[in-house]
Image (spheres, rainbow, N blue to C red):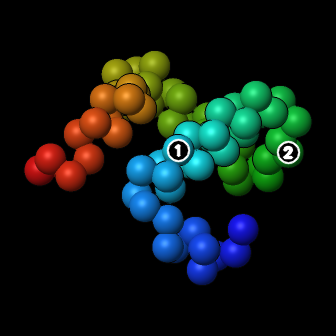
């Protein structure tokens, strides 16, 4: 599928594709190689969540809130 074809898809189909890609990436997370900078960034974000400085939002809740503001 070309970028032009993706741009012409309805928003609902684009979100379905994003969800499928996200699920696939999640299943392969152990295979990903991270640069030291990426690892540092992720570690700092994890620490912020653990310390209560940041909050994780449920994707379904975020998805349903899009466009409602």
25 sits left or right of 17 in the view: right
Can the viewer see residue 40 in this picture?
no
Q: CA distance from mark 1 to mark 2?
A: 26 Å
Going 83% across and 41% down the picture, which residue do you hit?
32
User: How many numbered marks have been drawn onto this rendered protein structure?
Assistant: 2
Classify mark 1: residues with Cα within 10 Å, few (<14), some (14-19) or many (20+): few
**Marks 1 and 2, the one that precedes in the sequence:** 1
Q: Quadrant of residue 57?
A: top left
- Residue furthest toward the bottom? 4
Q: Is residue 53 above or below residue 17?
A: above
Residue 11 position in % (x across, y down): 40, 58
x 59%, y 49%: residue: 17
| Residue reaching furthest to the left | 69
- Does 66 sit left or right of 40 as displayed? left
Mark 1 touches mark 2? (CB < 8 Å): no
Residue lying at 31% horizontally and 29% vertically, measured from the top left: 61
User: In the image shown, does 20 or 41 lie closer to the viewer?
Assistant: 20
Work out whether residue 63 or residue 6 is closer to the camera in this orientation and state it: 6
Residue 63's place in the image compared with 11, above or below, is above
- Label for residue 33? 2
Please state which of residues 42 and 31 is positioned toward the viewer in this rendering.
31
Measuring from the top left, give residue 22's x and y in whole percent. Answer: 62, 40
Q: Position of residue 41 (x, y in %)?
A: 60, 46
Q: Secondary structure at mark 1?
A: helix
Kindly tell me whether residue 31 is visible in this rendering. yes
Q: Secondary structure at mark 2?
A: loop
- Between tags 1 and 2, which lies in front? 1
Q: Residue at x 72, y 39 (%)?
A: 25
Q: Quadrant of residue 30?
A: top right
- Report the quarter where the N terminus lies: bottom right
Give the residue pinned by disc 1.
16
Image side of residue 53 versus residue 65, left or right:
right
């Amino acid at each position: 599928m070309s970028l032009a074809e993706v741009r012409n898809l309805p928003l609902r189909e684009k979100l379905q594709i994003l969800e499928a890609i996200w699920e696939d990436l999640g299943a392969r997370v152990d295979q990903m190689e991270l640069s030291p900078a990426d690892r540092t960034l992720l570690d700092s974000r994890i620490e912020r969540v653990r310390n209560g400085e940041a909050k994780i939002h449920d994707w379904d809740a975020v998805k349903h809130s899009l466009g409602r503001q």
